[in-house]
Image (cartoon, coloured by chain):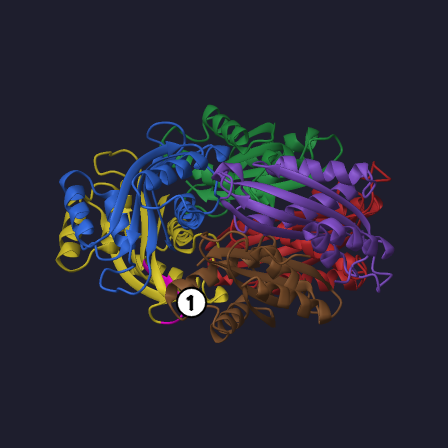
Chain colours: A green, B red, C brown, D purple, E blue, F yellow
Amino acid sequence: MDCTTIGKTSMILAMASGEDLDRYLKNAEQNKFRICIGQAGSMEFKKIVAAIETAAINEGLISKKYWQKHALYHACIEAFHGICRGELELGTILRTVGLRFVIVRGPRNVRDTGDGEWIAVALYGHMGAPIKGCEHEVVGLGINHI
Amino acid sequence: MDCTTIGKTSMILAMASGEDLDRYLKNAEQNKFRICIGQAGSMEFKKIVAAIETAAINEGLISKKYWQKHALYHACIEAFHGICRGELELGTILRTVGLRFVIVRGPRNVRDTGDGEWIAVALYGHMGAPIKGCEHEVVGLGINHI
Amino acid sequence: MDCTTIGKTSMILAMASGEDLDRYLKNAEQNKFRICIGQAGSMEFKKIVAAIETAAINEGLISKKYWQKHALYHACIEAFHGICRGELELGTILRTVGLRFVIVRGPRNVRDTGDGEWIAVALYGHMGAPIKGCEHEVVGLGINHI
Amino acid sequence: MDCTTIGKTSMILAMASGEDLDRYLKNAEQNKFRICIGQAGSMEFKKIVAAIETAAINEGLISKKYWQKHALYHACIEAFHGICRGELELGTILRTVGLRFVIVRGPRNVRDTGDGEWIAVALYGHMGAPIKGCEHEVVGLGINHI
Amino acid sequence: MDCTTIGKTSMILAMASGEDLDRYLKNAEQNKFRICIGQAGSMEFKKIVAAIETAAINEGLISKKYWQKHALYHACIEAFHGICRGELELGTILRTVGLRFVIVRGPRNVRDTGDGEWIAVALYGHMGAPIKGCEHEVVGLGINHI
Amino acid sequence: MDCTTIGKTSMILAMASGEDLDRYLKNAEQNKFRICIGQAGSMEFKKIVAAIETAAINEGLISKKYWQKHALYHACIEAFHGICRGELELGTILRTVGLRFVIVRGPRNVRDTGDGEWIAVALYGHMGAPIKGCEHEVVGLGINHI
């Protein structure tokens, strides 16, 4: 699959593994996307927000300027809506989530320059009861201008 | 990427194109997933629900029994939350969406028999103002037991 | 069942029929509850709001004073949340509802005077796809001070 | 009142007491509904979910298979929307709830065989500030295929 | 600005400071509005609800009667929606808020007698990450009959 | 009141009238805020979004670049949450709104340079039943980086 748009690129990287992941990562970086990948599992969203923000700052995807954090934060919250599908709650309604997160910064489409810079947060993992096996897959994607 | 779980399989099929799509489709069908793919663009969710339900019934993924429609309907609504990220509204707040939808029926994980049957609705496309170019990518995934 | 509290009284009246309904209605009126019962089916909430408000005014349960309408309106909206269970949408997401509505005005509990006056809106009926048989029961209850 | 549909049956059982409850319970069981009744009060939904799930498993209404828990879980969450009427929050917005819960498994309508099996969660109780007397009645009903 | 309507009056008082505040306060009191002003900062809404309710009771704006608390509580929750803009969450999604709150009781419009009595909760302050400087302004206004 | 922060400035301008408005407008412009004021009344949010976007483009507050529209659009939607207080619905639940909107572009705080550029949408007006007099005041404020 092609890594030419910021949304598809981030979702593919969130789902790929092994050699696939390496190949797509190289492909995406050739397209000038800046990328950061991590893992977070919790019954509290605040830990996942913190993990994503820390990773993005440490990898240099965003600076510590507030407007950059603001852009990333809202992309996170939008991605959580895909994960939660109706109620932005985890442990409070007795469910937990384990996610790979991928943050991508760059153009919306590598073929389209002059469109400003964007940031995407893609999430892929499993949500369910806090019992092994009682869970199904979930995805979320938030995209924001930065 | 491997098509062994119902969520990843449906999301990959929603994003792949050309030879990739053919290859993943074959892969998924070998894994005993039953699949239906379509396209829908609208400022009204009811048209997208109708398109998905019609496709699923015509392709034989669900019967006309109410509980099967009920399962599919709720998977659709959950996927819409990923697309909308907060407000289940399209034209009413002046935005429109163009989506590829993929419906997959089968086990949660092909390696896990005895877990009942599940249905996934994956959505990938673009949402934005009703003006060409003013849009970004969105994804949604809903999974339900059937 | 006893009709001594405003919520239970309104829910029972929303679900009872035939002689049961007559008996509970008499019981409730002896408890000084003022009651109004109607029927509404629609794919649009605005028609149900209008039917409830019109019935309440015609039956003298509320006056045309704004604060009385305001109290009833918010009780309606709260009851709709029970009906909708997550998204305050009907036809826009391809579902329709047929409801009996019951409006009750009086104390929260007939044994408790000096607690002010309250208004309850109870809804009972069926929600589903706009196809006969594809529907299940729904209830909603909103209670507000007036 | 007649206990021939799964929704009305569960709501009546949630509100009835004393001899009424015994009579409706017998009536419902003759109609082949399987029933489980319990009590839960909390400022946290996770405790109510846990109480309902534990009761359902202990009473044999659902097995430990994930898809059965998944069906029950979503019926719970839908019922909570009726209880909360807008914000799926309890203690976090300084309110508490005391509920009787009723879980019913069986057909949607006892006169309609061949329609699959359904599960209903009915809730009836009081919500309010964590101070005695500052509360009013609430109801919730969630119905799901299983 | 004129303090003749309950909403504008409460919002102005929430934003004014120094001599401006004194002047608007005098103006509002001449218009027979009863007013209470306080400050609350937290990652938990329950603390803000409690601060507002305590202030309103201590200042005599509401009595301890349940219907009066009920009116104030719902005005608070409505104001929080303006503050939160989509998800009624603070610390759970890693954000914090510092607010001035203003409670005003009186007519909707001082020129309009015979319209019943109303209560407004106005909030003005800053919301953001729990790091100094990473925040922007937020407002909220809830108005209810009492 | 001082017009030194983008949120307070936009809210004051949304509520002021006559000479007050002129004075605050001059004050705000001296602080290098770029401002656009308009009026919109409707039972449909899409008309209000369109009015705000058109005004912002015509007055040169944003260009036609997608990321600028994206920033403004999300500020609008956030402001609508304050207006709606729970359900992003107008005519569909039988209510209508008349608003003054104010769009302000500039720094978050005029004393703080180097913090990027922000856009605020402030709304002030009346919401209620589509009958004269049955309405109360509402406010909303959305702030976004641009």
**Could you tell me residue C64's position as x and y percent?**
40, 71
Chain hosting mark 1: F
Q: Indicate the amino acid at tag 1.
A: Met
Name the outermost residue toward the bottom.
C58
Question: Is A95 part of what is drawn in magenta?
Answer: no
Quarter of the rendering containing residue C110: bottom right
Quadrant in which the N terminus of chain D is drawn:
bottom right
Question: Is F129 part of what is drawn in magenta?
Answer: yes
Name the outermost residue toward the top.
A58
Frontmost residue, C67 versus A92:
C67
**Can residue C15 be seen?**
yes
In this picture, is A88 found above or below A48? below
Q: Specify few, some or many for label 1: CA neighbours under 10 Å numbering under 14, 14-19, or 20 or more.
A: some
Q: Give the residue pinned by disc 1.
A: F43
**Could you tell me residue A84's position as x and y percent?**
60, 42
**Could you tell me residue D43's position as x and y percent?**
56, 36
Frontmost residue, D72 versus E146:
E146
Q: Secondary structure at mark 1?
A: loop
Quarter of the rendering containing residue E102: top left
Q: Which stretch is magenta?
A: F125-131
**Can residue C97 be seen?**
no
**Could you tell me residue D112's position as x and y percent?**
84, 64
Which residue is painted at 65% across and 60% down in the image? C12
Question: How many numbered tags mark residues here?
Answer: 1
In this image, D24 relative to E84: left or right?
A: right
In this image, D31 relative to E90: left or right?
A: right
